[in-house]
Image: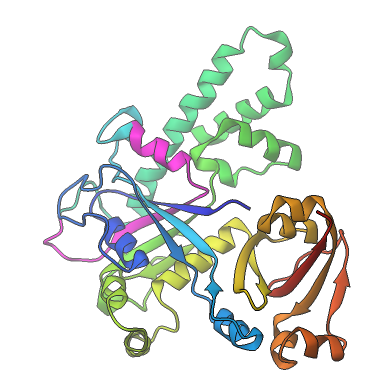
Amino acid sequence: MSGLSIGIVGLPNVGKSTLFNALLGKRIADASNYPFCTIDPNVGVVEVPDEKLPILAKIVNTTKITPAAVEFVDIAGLVKGASQGEGLGNKFLTNIRDCQAICHVVRSFSDPNIIREGSSNPKGDFEVVCAELIIKDLESLDKYLDSNKNNTKEKTSPKYILAQKLKSELEKGTLAVHVGLNEEDQNLLKEFFLLTAKPYFIVANVDEDTYKNIDEFRPQLENVIPVCAKVEFELSELPLQDQVDYLRQLGMANSGLERVIQKAYGVLGLQSFYTAGVKEARAWTVKIGATAPQAAGVIHTDFQHGFIMAEIVSYSDFVAHRGWEGAKISGKLRHEGKDYIMSPDDIVEFRFNV
């Protein structure tokens, strides 16, 4: 699959740029204390933390490790009325359209020195952004419906009927991603490029002393991850072992970066598989339910077109039997064909015709 791109969105001064800087581990976005400090979207590629890769590299005796990667886009702060051009308006909304999923950042820290620009509470912040996305999507649907209202053939098409259904649901405040659709309509939905059709999750930017407490948000919002962007940025500037120690003091098993990426994989239905040899140990990203040829195509389209079979060992067996040869001797190496559905953490070698 193509690179994974997550748009970080929210009202001004809720901590988007601070979170972005923490995810990348260095100062890139301007985190100044005033609205619209991010005028053009900052884009950064982050390696997906993966404890399996060093173990695989040691087993196959390679020094080259290539993790999977996620692209984060820090998009300028949105304000109420953006769909009508307020603030940075359409520029903001266009940047969201280019991302595969949305990370909504809502403010849940109490620092009075940080200006509140339309922010009220986590649920309210989220609803303001969603309202602007809905208004923009209604404009897109209305444009399509109006341009075809006199087209008798088009008005009876599944696409036109779907557009009417989506318009009705959006007017009720329902995001397109939550509208129940069959497989045919799911495919047609893609033709509208709706902002509210994108999978999303929410990051609640909390104070340090409430970093571990998310209970207050659960009744209000789903898909919430508590993250203290300030702490995460401080973590990003520490050596690795100090990061581990700091997280332990906070009672956290994983960093915010790891939890954000795990959630992104979850909402997009993604999983990892691996290749491991003397040249490198590498993680690849594929949709859950992908077949072996589709996974091969992630590496190179020629691998998919010329696919013969996949030699596969589970990660646990690969480690237990110390690599390909040990797994083969122990009968743990499997030969799978075109119908094989990839499992999480498969170690794979593809056989193909050039």
Looking at the picture, tell me which residue is in the foreground, 66 or 250.
Answer: 66
Magenta-span inclusion, residue 301: no
Tell which residue pokes out farthest to the top in this image: 150
Quarter residue 78 falls in: top left
Q: Position of residue 85 (x, y in %)?
A: 30, 29
Magenta-span inclusion, residue 94: yes
The magenta stretch spans which residues?
90-114
Q: Is residue 60 above or below residue 102?
A: below
- Residue drawn 53% across and 70% down? 67
Q: Position of residue 120 (x, y in %)?
A: 26, 53
Q: Position of residue 320 (x, y in %)?
A: 72, 92
Q: Is residue 215 left or right of residue 321?
A: left
- Residue drawn 38% across and 69% down? 226
- Residue drawn 43% across and 64% down? 46
Q: Position of residue 107 (x, y in %)?
A: 29, 59
Q: Is residue 350 left or right of residue 283?
A: right
Tell which residue pokes out farthest to the left in this image: 113
